[in-house]
Image (cartoon, rainbow, N blue to C red):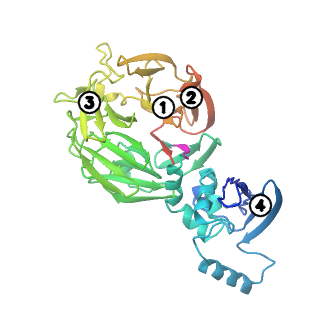
Amino acid sequence: MSEERSCVVVTRDCQTESNGTACMSYRLDSIEVQNGKRPLEYDQEGENVQRKLQKQSDGSNLVGVTLSLGSSSASPPEQTDKQDRAGDNSDRNTLFPALDRDSSINSLIRCSRSDYGAIASLNHSFRSLIRSSELYRARRRNGVVEHWVYFSCQPLEWEAFDPARLRWMRLPRMTPNDCFVLSDKESLGVGTELLICGKDVLAHVIYRYSLLTNTWSTGMQMNAPRCLFGKASLGEIAIFAGGCDSQGKILSSAELYNSETGTWTTLRSMTKPRKMCSGVFMDGKFYVIGGIGGADAKLLTCAEEYDLATGTWTEIPNMSPVQPNLENDIPDTSAAPPLLAVVDNQLYSADYAEMAVKKYEKHNKAWVTIGGLPEGVSSIHGWGLAFRACGDRLIVVGGPRVMGRGFIEVHSWAPREGPPEWNLLGQKQSGSFVYNCSVMGC
């Protein structure tokens, strides 16, 4: 395996109350992960890591401090053991010697989370911080959020894409049974977790990927297990609504999941049971839109709005972009749920049949076509194509329908920049059918 390097720069402006204002810049340079070891996102840590901490005061008087971790030919084994024991017994609240803990964390939250794996390799204190939720809670409080796209084009295999650094990352492989592999699955990123909901041999099951530990785990259950539901996340919380139970009964119930506490709270039920619906957060409220419902399992064109403050549902007629088409021979249950995404509190839809992007006009409660989808991406009645919000932009993940092993593309468009003009962010050889896709912002 070839040698890899990771470089992190941390800039922190500080103010002191005494003797006026002083500006101090701390830079964490040249974090080198050698011997082919990868950062935390790859579930491996660097063995030989060198850190150079430079302190700059008033633009001058640079002081360089080099700390070597791991094995070193210049240090006898006895001395290394003493140093390791001293490090283990040192004050774990100290990260940067010249800064208190709060200032250190305020510096680290400015780093890209792509670099946290390398930073965790520095010592036990950094590793404990990165693997706790403290750093990400601080990022959330300070409005520091990075959005990564997580998707699966092969059963049990998940990848992540960083649209800022255009970097692909592979997650550890899932190890469920064959029943889970063949079942319908839903995915959602919430807080620092990626939830994959499917069905085991006898019951519904949830696999949870933790960004903090880079591992998969199971054992978590909803109060009312379900599949084919509408869902959306807002920070550390998520709402799951509708769907159907293990007997195929369409549900009207809803639940709120808190990723910080790992708890599920049952909410008031919707006015209509529905499955194969979509969910979004917009203007601080949760919307479940479209789907299949009723005694005759027909297409629903209405939506329901859930007010978190009052705990009530309100039905909104004709909010779904998918309307009945009497000329279409495709059964309603064969088409994908509405492909929806919200950017800057504006609701957008991907019309796979017309290869168009539509926007929901709130003032007149109508959908209008504003442009096209990226050329070359394909789907099967909407399945296999991902349309997601990723920060201030819309993301389309998909590829052309080809024989054999194809490729996957990630396209991006920022609505605030004008009509749809899609930019190709990344392309790699892969299956071109997207089974599941979610965005995690933290």
Residue annotated with mark 1: 343
Identify residue for label 2.
Answer: 414
Q: Secondary structure at mark 1?
A: strand
Task: From the viewer's side, name the closer residue of 282 and 173.
Answer: 282
N-term mark: 4 or 1: 4
Q: Which of 155/315 is in front?
A: 315
Which numbered disc, 3 or 1, marks the residue that appears first in the sequence?
A: 3
Q: Tags 2 and 1 in contact by the CB under 8 Å rule?
A: yes
- Residue 243's x, y, as percent? 27, 39
- Relative side of 348 to 146, left or right: left
Q: Nearer the viewer, mark 3 or mark 1?
A: 1
Helix, strand or loop at mark 4: strand
Camera sees residue 183: no
Of pointers 2 and 1, the one earlier in the residue sequence: 1
Q: Secondary structure at mark 2?
A: loop
Point out residue 335 in the picture as x, y percentages from the top left corner: 35, 27
Q: Earlier in the sequence, mark 2 or mark 3?
A: 3
147 magenta-colored: yes
Q: Quadrant of residue 424?
A: top right
For badge 4, the amino acid type reads Gln
Residues in magenta, as a range: 144-149
Q: Which residue is mark 3?
A: 292
Nearer the observer, 243 or 165: 165
Q: Is residue 429 above or below residue 22?
A: above
Name which of mark 2 and mark 4 comes first in the sequence.
4
Q: CA distance from mark 4 to mark 1?
A: 39 Å
Question: Mark 4 or mark 1: which is in front?
Answer: 4
Farthest front residue in view: 19
